[in-house]
Image (cartoon, grey):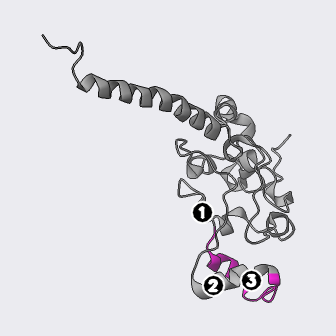
Amino acid sequence: MSRFVFPRWANKTRDLAGIVLGGAPLYLIGAIWYGFSPKTIDAGYMPKQPVPYSHALHAGELGIDCRYCHNTVEQAAHAAIPPTATCMNCHARVRKTSAKLEPIRQSAETGDAVEWIKVHDLPDYVYFNHSAHVTRGVGCVSCHGRVDKMPEVFQQEPLSMGWCLDCHRAPEQHLRPPSEVTNMGYKPEGG
């Protein structure tokens, strides 16, 4: 008769169980922490950008349509962050020596992209399709707020699952004619 009650491999099982039982709570805490991090639900999140870009000036005072810079919003799942060439379409002639635009000029010369920081950054497990919303008449302002009045863009809404479901349960208040999706001041007839 063997002097061992359990086979030798059972010792490894004990060690593995300790790792799993110790690691699972850490993983769970990390997942919850990330889910509640400012990048996912913090209305008011406003990271410092590499170039001080004012949506209040460009979209507000100058009236540049959202789709001029975010030109994929009607065809793609993601709204593109504009390439440097889009900025240079105007800034090759307008304020071309401004110190604020130095990173844009360097990017145009070197071909290296400006490292913009996403403001509305959803977790990887979330599927959101911009084109599906925009082409059906959900205005930019419904999720992004009045960016035409924001000197620096910030996250207006929490972008949580509950917030999305509130709209999906009663979308009427956010729908408008597709031709008006980028009109930040849109008011429905009679409203």
**Which residue in the protein does label 2 denote?**
108
| Residue 122 picture location, percent across and down | 61, 47
Instruction: Name the quarter where the N terminus is drawn.
Output: top left
Q: Tell me the residue at 62%/88% (across/down).
A: 109
Q: Which numbered disc flags the more N-terminal residue, 3 or 2?
A: 3
Given the image, on which type of amino acid does mark 1 rest? Answer: Ala
Dot 3 falls on a residue whose secondary structure is helix
Which range of residues does the magenta coloring cover?
A: 82-99
- Label 3 or label 2, whichever lies nearer to me, is 3
**Which residue in the protein does label 3 denote?**
102
64 above or below 125?
Answer: below
Instruction: Name the quarter where the C terminus is drawn.
Output: top right
Query: Is residue 105 part of the magenta span, yes or no?
Result: no
Given the image, on which type of amino acid does mark 2 rest? Answer: Ala
**Which residue in the protein does label 1 denote?**
80
| Residue 28 picture location, percent across and down | 55, 31
Query: Is residue 87 part of the magenta span, yes or no?
Result: yes
Q: Which numbered disc flags the more N-terminal residue, 2 or 1?
A: 1
Crowd band around label 1 with a 10 angstrom C-alpha radius: few (<14), some (14–19), many (20+): few
Judge by depth and name the residue closer to the eye, 99 or 188: 99
| Residue 86 picture location, percent across and down | 65, 76
Toward the front, the furthest residue is: 3
Q: Which numbered disc flags the more N-terminal residue, 3 or 1?
A: 1
57 above or below 149?
Answer: below
Alpha-carbon span between mark 2 and mark 1: 18 Å
